[in-house]
Image (cartoon, rainbow, N blue to C red):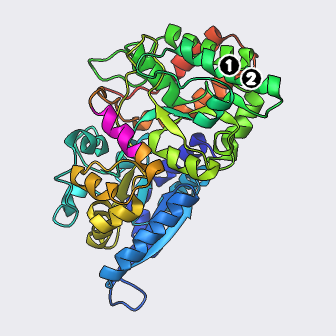
């Protein structure tokens, strides 16, 4: 099983990257014929992202004949172990897709290029500054160029709600109690009708969920100096709520939750019209729409206090450049094209997030269909109410997601009381706080 824990072991080996990379396959710049540069690019994602990215790379090739691009692609489950192995062996791709949970880990090990050293090629000046800053290390070094904005939200299948005889909830004021009620009602309808449908596919083991629960409680998983660390009481309340969803039938049991998560975006319940609700970063709805064939919608998170969902912009992901890229300007040229070229933007659309370049949003809008506009409209609507985003996961906290999943599953399976699990989660989290 691919976990953040095994990735951390490889990352430790990658600490010697600069010395290794000098001897690796990337040490000799230029293409096979020596008349240009070859840039390897590596990303994760589903089938839709893979197709769109390759289409954009074909477009790049038409206008950059001096740069040969070698694409590499993986699903999320295999991406991080492979990437860590490549870095440790001096065989890293020059351009790589990076996630906020790992950017500090790689960046603080000097594995990623300071993007401001190639600012003459990669122009990020027009990007929303608050989003751009999420790609910086604590010392201000810019190691990730945000691809766009992702907002943790609730996906909903209106068709299933209609079949169950339920109205679309008012997400401007709904609470977690309201959410439990409607998901339970869906499951009750499905049981009565003999339908293989459930209100919610899975909940209770995700750092994104717990982070939202913390924000709504006035706390953070990784607080800044002026913020408060999440409390054991808050973690307990989150775990108890998740357990209550299972006990009521609103969500499936823990074994099926684990299976559904492992099935992936296209094969899980929500992507196959067998769950009415699903927690996700908002642009994922496009992949779910394609898989399900249903007109899925997006809603704000339920809130602990009605009307206060504490929605935040998160850099959906980043493009980074390996510190020892043999031709950083060629790599930067490719990243600049993928981020700022209007025609590339029309190809990539918003599957990786709503672009943080405002002028490109209007360009993209001209080619979006009704389903795709769901993501763009949602992001635009949220900008008037989003709050300060949380601190990017520090290098010391990379393994928290795995630890949370492992421990919270003990609560869901009923092997330990939520309060006991919460205390251990807090102990783990406290030990992962960055040194000040």
Instruction: Say if 270 sits above or below 74 in the image.
Output: above
SS at badge 1? helix
Above or below, 343 relative to 185: below
Q: Identify the residue shown where x is 38% and y is 38%.
A: 378
Residue found at x 33% / y 58%: 366
Q: Is residue 268 left or right of residue 425?
A: right
Q: Which residue is mark 1?
A: 185
Residues under numbered marks 1 and 2 in contact, where contact means CB atoms less than 8 Å apart: yes
Q: Identify the residue shown where x is 54% and y is 51%.
A: 80
Residue stretch in magenta: 375-383
Residue lying farthest right? 194
How packed mark 1 is, by other alpha carbons closer than 10 Å (few <14, some 14-19, many 20 or more), is many
The percent position of residue 321, horizontal first and vertical second, equals: 35, 60
- Residue carrying label 2: 189
Q: Dot 2, crowdedness within 10 Å: few (<14), some or many (≥20)?
A: some
Asked if residue 290 lies left or right of residue 300, the reply is: right
Q: Secondary structure at mark 2?
A: helix
User: Would you say residue 382 sits in the magenta stretch?
Assistant: yes
């Amino acid at each position: 099983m691919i976990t953040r824990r095994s990735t951390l072991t490889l990352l430790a080996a990658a600490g010697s990257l600069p010395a290794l990379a000098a001897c690796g396959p990337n040490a000799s710049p230029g293409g096979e014929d020596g008349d240009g540069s070859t840039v390897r690019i590596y990303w994760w994602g589903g089938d839709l992202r893979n197709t769109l990215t390759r289409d954009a790379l074909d477009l790049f090739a038409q206008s950059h004949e001096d740069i040969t691009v070698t694409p590499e692609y993986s699903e999320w489950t295999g991406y991080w172990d492979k990437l860590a192995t490549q870095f440790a062996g001096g065989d890293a791709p020059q351009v790589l897709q990076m996630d906020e949970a790992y950017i500090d880990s790689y960046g603080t090990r000097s594995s990623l290029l300071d993007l401001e050293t190639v600012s003459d090629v990669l122009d990020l000046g027009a990007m929303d500054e608050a989003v751009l800053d999420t790609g910086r290390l604590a010392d201000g070094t810019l190691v990730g160029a945000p691809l766009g904005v992702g907002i943790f939200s609730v996906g909903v299948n209106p068709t299933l709600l209609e079949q169950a005889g339920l109205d679309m909830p008012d997400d401007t004021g709904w609470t977690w109690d309201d959410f439990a009620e409607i998901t339970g009602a869906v499951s009750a309808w499905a049981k009565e009708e003999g339908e293989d449908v459930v209100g919610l596919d899975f909940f209770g083991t995700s750092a994104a969920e717990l982070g939202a629960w913390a924000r709504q409680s006035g706390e953070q998983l990784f607080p800044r100096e002026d913020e408060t660390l999440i409390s054991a009481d808050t973690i307990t309340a989150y775990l108890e709520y998740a357990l209550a969803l299972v006990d009521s039938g609103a969500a499936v049991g823990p074994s099926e939750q684990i299976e559904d998560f492992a099935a992936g975006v296209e094969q899980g319940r929500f992507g196959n019209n067998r769950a009415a609700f699903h927690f996700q970063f908002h642009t994922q709805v496009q992949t779910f729409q394609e898989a399900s064939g249903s007109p899925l919608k997006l809603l704000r998170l339920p809130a602990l206090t009605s009307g206060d969902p504490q929605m935040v912009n998160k850099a959906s992901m980043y493009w980074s450049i390996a510190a020892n890229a043999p031709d950083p300007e060629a790599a930067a040229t490719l990243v600049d094209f993928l981020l700022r070229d209007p025609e590339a933007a029309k190809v990539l659309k918003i599957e990786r997030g709503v672009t943080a370049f405002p002028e490109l949003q209007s360009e993209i809008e001209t080619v979006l269909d009704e389903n795709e506009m769901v993501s763009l409209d949602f992001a635009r609507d949220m900008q008037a109410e989003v709050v300060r985003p949380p601190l990017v996961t520090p290098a010391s906290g990379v393994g928290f997601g795995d630890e949370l999943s492992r421990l919270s599953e003990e609560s869901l399976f009923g092997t330990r009381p939520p309060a006991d699990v919460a205390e251990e989660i807090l102990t783990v989290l406290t030990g992962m706080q960055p040194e000040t």
